[in-house]
Structure formats: structure tokens, C-alpha cells
Image (cartoon, rainbow, N blue to C red):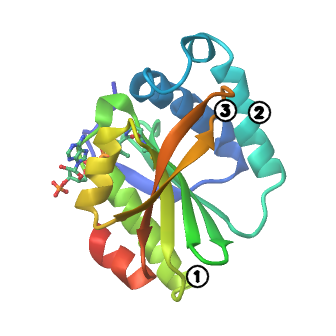
Amino acid sequence: MPDFTTPPQLRVATAADADAIAALHTASWRSAYRDALSEAYLRGPIEQERLVFWRDRYRHAGPGLWTVVAEDAKGSLVGFLCALLDHDRDWGNYIHNLHVDPDAKQQGIGRMMMRAAADHFVYALPRRPVYLFVLQSNIAAQAFYNRLGGDPVEELVATQPDGTSARAIRYAWPSVAAFADGVA
Ligand SMILES: CC(C)(COP(=O)(O)OP(=O)(O)OC[C@H]1O[C@@H](n2cnc3c(N)ncnc32)[C@H](O)[C@@H]1OP(=O)(O)O)[C@@H](O)C(=O)NCCC(=O)NCCS
């Protein structure tokens, strides 16, 4: 269980965090994506697949990769947010991954990391909009993004890491200022 005898602390991730991020990503998908990803993938291959994904991501990291992690009092990872800055010419800064430890949800860590992303966007790319995708079946995350001022702007079909397809919703904020207001 996470140790919150002191408040969670945020810091910018480095390549050294890739394995811990992969482990938390795996735990979060196993908990929250039981209906969205295949049972066979979640039972086994996910661990190696996420490890390869995150190690590769840092091995080939471009200047637009920015990840913030949240740690508990013992320094264990309890959340991460990975953004790809200026990823899309029209839609702007892409929040590609956002996960909180299943035992630490709804305690403000998700909002805290979105706020850190807003601070970074204001500094790095103040004029760009912000967007992300959420699965149509992920009602809980949609409630979170609605609360943080995101607009569900379109639906499309996405290919998932287990090879299946799923309907996803694009959430967008028209500017960094709107994003910063929503997550404040
Ligand atoms: C979605 C997720 C990142 C949200 O992070 P969190 O730390 O649980 O959320 P927070 O505690 O920061 O919540 C912020 C606000 O959203 C609301 N909210 C969060 N989860 C909610 C839910 N399931 N239903 C309704 N509202 C919710 C909170 O009430 C809170 O409102 P407030 O600040 O006005 O009190 C987290 O729950 C998670 O990791 N889920 C599993 C993985 C996932 O779905 N990631 C998103 C992929 S697109």
C-alpha cells in the first residue's frame, strides 16, 4: 500500500524510471482495463510489452517527451503522466499516458500531475492546445476529464497494444490557458 505519511511528491522522470513506470502502467491496466484489454494479454505478455515500450521510449526520446512521476513517502511510484509536446500540428500537446496507483486513486494525485503538466506547457509551449484520448468504456476517466474542463470533441477507433480495436474519445482543451484553468 502507498505510504502517505507525507504528501506525494512530484518530479520529472528520467530514463532510470522506465522500469518502475512500466510496472505501474501494468498494474493500472490490470485494474482499470479488465473490460478493455484481452484477458490473455493482461495475464501475461503485458509486463514484458510495457517494459519494452517504456525502455524504447526513453532510448529514442526526442525533445518533446516529458514525464512527471508522483512518489509516496518511501519513494515508490504512485502515479505518472507522460506528455508529447507539440505532437500534433492541429491538436497540440498530447497527454499520452496518465495513471495513478489503483490504491491511491481519487486522492488528488491525478489532478496534481495535470497541474504540473499545465505549468510545464505554459513554460514550454504556451500557445498550443492540449488533447488526449480516453477509451469509450473508461467512464471513470471521462468523469475525471469532464471535471477538469476537457471537451469530448470526437470519437474514433484505436488499435490497442494487445492488437484489438476499441472506440476512443478525443478530449481537448482549446489552449494552454484553458487547460491550466481546468486543472487548477
Ligand atoms: C483517471 C485517473 C488518472 C484520475 O486520477 P485520480 O488521482 O484518481 O483523480 P483525482 O483524485 O485527482 O480527481 C480529480 C477530480 O476528478 C474527480 N474524479 C476522479 N475520478 C472520478 C471518478 N471515477 N468519478 C467521478 N469523478 C472523479 C474527483 O472527484 C476530483 O474532483 P475534485 O478535485 O473537484 O474533488 C486515475 O483514477 C487512474 O489512474 N485511473 C486508471 C487509469 C486510467 O483510466 N487512466 C486514464 C487513461 S485515459
Residue 109 visible in rendering? no
Characterize the local packing of mark 2: few (<14), some (14-19) or many (20 or more) Cα atoms within 10 angstroms: some
What amino acid is at disc 2? Val
Residue at which label 2 appears: 52
What amino acid is at disc 1? Ala
On screen, residue 118 above or below 111: below
Residue 39: image location, x then y, percent: 54, 12
- Which type of secondary structure does the marked residue at label 3 adopt? loop
Q: Which of the pair 40/59 is nearer the observer?
A: 40
Quadrant (top left/top right/bottom left/bottom right) for the C terminus: bottom left
Residue at which label 3 appears: 161
Tell me: is circle 3 under 8 Å from ligand 1. no
Residue 27 visible in rendering? yes
On screen, residue 25 above or below 155: above
Characterize the local packing of mark 3: few (<14), some (14-19) or many (20 or more) Cα atoms within 10 angstroms: some
Residue pictured at 35% horizontal, 80% vertical: 178
Residue 124 is tagged as 1
What amino acid is at disc 3? Pro
For the residues labelled 3 and 1, say whether their Cβ atoms are less than 8 Å apart: no
Residue pictured at 34% horizontal, 59% vertical: 112
- The number of callouts visible is 3
Tell me: is circle 2 under 8 Å from ligand 1. no
Residue pictured at 72% horizontal, 27% vertical: 49
- Which type of secondary structure does the marked residue at label 2 adopt? helix
Residue ranking furthest to the bottom = 127
- How far, Cα to Cα, is label 2 from label 3? 12 Å
